[in-house]
Amino acid sequence: MNSHLPCLWSLKLIRTEAMSSVLQGFTKSLAMTFVSEIGDKTFFAAAILAMRYPRRLVLAGCVSALIVMTILSATVGWAAPNLISRKWTHHITTMLFFGFGLWSLWDGFKGEGGESEELAEVEAELDSDLKANGKATKDNNSKIEDENKKQKRPFLTQFFSPIFLKAFSINFFGEFGDKSQLATIGLAADENPFGVVLGGVVAQLLCTTAAVIGGKSLASQISERIVALSGGMLFIIFGIQSFLTSVE
């Protein structure tokens, strides 16, 4: 009986360490993604789209895109230590945290703190896209009527709503090369990838839901300076913690 006690103790210790690893990855990812996405271009896009189209379709499209991007980014981060030594991935992640922290702090200090320029930029882009589509629809209205029976619907629109696809594509491609995507890759390379995905998904869901429900009125009240400074401080804290953590 006593001979089994060391084995049971080892199993409990491994389970505790695994849960602690997941929780740490979850907490870091949740905080990092939340401060990165609030006031981000995809946040504003979701808020504006929700004013023009059914909210449930916009929310579903935006959240689906961000979840897919989070999983892809975490997968890349998880695979990185298999391609590069864990020591190098740890150092690169540490530099990324410090770099993003200084970048965010610089954006916060140089910002004027007035109306969000990014919100106006996203709204202008969506307006121009809507006008271009409307003009094309008017110009080709007669041709569409003549060829409507001959033409097949695009493949994806046979299964998904065009509004869902629009929201998905805007958010998915808007995240490519974004600060939050690169930070997720670095975080997944240094922390438990499952915890990173879980924390990122929860944060994306919270941010996008707030954007869709609050709309432009909420988006216009967000201070880019406060968000940038808060995010910068968080990245710096993560960088210091990563720097002080030894590599196994």
Image (spheres, helix red, strand yellow):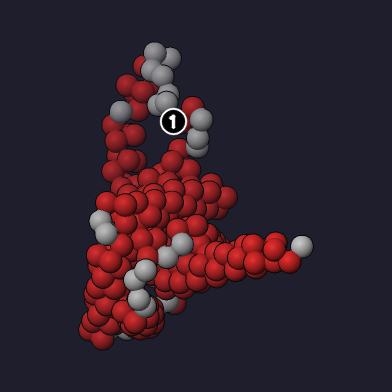
Residue farthest to the right?
A: 1
Residue 134: give x, y in percent of width and height.
34, 41
Q: Is residue 97 visible?
A: yes
In the rendered structure, the answer to whether residue 89 lies left or right of residue 195 reads: left
Indicate the quadrant where residue 181 lies: bottom left
Q: Nearer the viewer, residue 188 or 108?
A: 188
Residue 11: give x, y in percent of width and height.
62, 62
Image vertical order of residue 195 relative to residue 24, above or below: above
Label 1 Cα crowd, 10 Å radius (few <14 / some 14-19 / many 20+) = few
Q: Nearer the viewer, residue 224 or 236?
A: 236
Q: Nearer the viewer, residue 92 or 30?
A: 92
Residue at x 47%, y 52% (from the top left corner): 67
Residue at x 37%, y 68% (from the top left corner): 248
Q: Give the quadrant of the N terminus.
A: bottom right
Image vertical order of residue 30 relative to residue 104, above or below: above
Indicate the quadrant where residue 209 lies: bottom right
In the rendered structure, the answer to whether residue 85 lies left or right of residue 217 reads: left
Indicate the quadrant where residue 4 lies: bottom right
Residue at x 57%, y 50% (from the top left corner): 56
Q: Where is mark 1, residue-wise? A: 156
How many dots with numbers?
A: 1
In the rendered structure, the answer to whether residue 59 lies left or right of residue 245 reads: right
Residue farthest to the top?
A: 150
Q: Secondary structure at mark 1?
A: helix
In the rendered structure, the answer to whether residue 80 lies left or right of residue 167 reads: left
Q: Is residue 216 visible?
A: no
Residue at x 46%, y 62% (from the top left corner): 192
Image vertical order of residue 229 relative to residue 69, above or below: below
Residue 156: give x, y in percent of width and height.
44, 30
Q: Nearer the viewer, residue 50 or 141?
A: 50
Residue farthest to the bottom?
A: 109
